[in-house]
Image: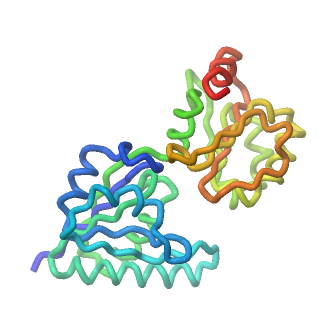
Amino acid sequence: MQTGILYGISVGTGDPELITLKGLRLLKQMPVVAFPLGVGGKPGMAEQIVAQWLSPSSVQLALNFPYVQDETILSSAWHQAAEQVWQYLQKGQDVAFACEGDVSFYSTFTYLAQTLQELHPQVAIQTVPGVCSPMAAASVLGLPLTIRDRKLVVLPALYRVEELEAVLDWADVVVLLKVSSVYEQVWQVLHRRQLLSRSYVVERATLPDMAIYKDLCDRPHLKLPYFSLLIVQVTVEKSLIQKSKEKIS
């Protein structure tokens, strides 16, 4: 029997209408749809995004991916999730994994797919691209991430905050992901660099409870949720700053 195909489907940053037509078509026709389990057993972000689109007859498979940095714990979770998905693939059933943001951009799907192929090399994997958080944040801010020869850097702040100083020496735009736990440290760096007036925090981009913080000069102690990012316009045309301030004021 031919094994099923694992589809990694990007479902965007929160707004259900940001799913691509291709991704939506696949989600509606898949016999099995998997997604990360939310914190505390609650519905996760991807599950909430796709819930209204799924067929009542589809199997919905919540996979546990712990929010920890311990490689041993994470590896065990990836293996367990891969075997859960394999139970369906080996029967010839296709499985769609709904992935918040884009499947190729700091995605849980990458670990699932790699582990599954290590355990079962015969499995075919296909992906559908989508909207990732920096693009969504730039859209709600009304700022282009890059123009002309401007250099963009994306850093997972939780793991790379020590590199921020060096990056600010040569980048034109910096996006800091997973900034919530290191925000105060980042704020101090931006304060020394006099960049707080050109920095923006977006939390839960495109969701109904989205929040935007601009000009961070008087915000050294923001308490941010996990789904928050910070954009720094290190060098920027004055017209772009003014347009953004008018848009989000």
Identity of the residue drawn at 68% across and 22% down: 241
Quadrant in which the N terminus is drawn: bottom left
Looking at this view, is 249 or 201 the one in front? Answer: 249
Residue 89 horizontal/vertical position (percent): 22, 77
- Outermost residue toward the left? 1
Q: Is residue 165 above or below residue 139?
A: below
Residue 9, above or below 93: above
Residue name at image x 43 percent, y 82 percent: 79
Residue at the outermost right position: 192
Q: Quadrant of residue 123?
A: bottom left
Where residue 21 appears, x then y in whole percent?
25, 44
Indicate the quadrant containing the C terminus: top left, top right, bottom left or bottom right: top right
Position of 34 with respect to 134 (left or right) is: left
Residue drawn at x 68%, y 18% is 242
Between 235 and 40, which is closer to the camera in this rendering? 40
Query: How many labels, in total?
Result: 0
Residue that lies at the very extreme toward the top in this rendered image: 239
Residue 94 pos. (x, y %): 20, 69
Query: Left or right: where does residue 100 sit relative to residue 226?
Result: left
Residue 147 picture location, percent across and down: 56, 23
Is 64 drawn above or below residue 224 in the view shown?
below
Q: Is residue 128 left or right of residue 191?
A: left
How is the model colour-coded? rainbow
Q: Quadrant of residue 95?
A: bottom left
For this view, does 122 lie left or right of residue 131?
Answer: left
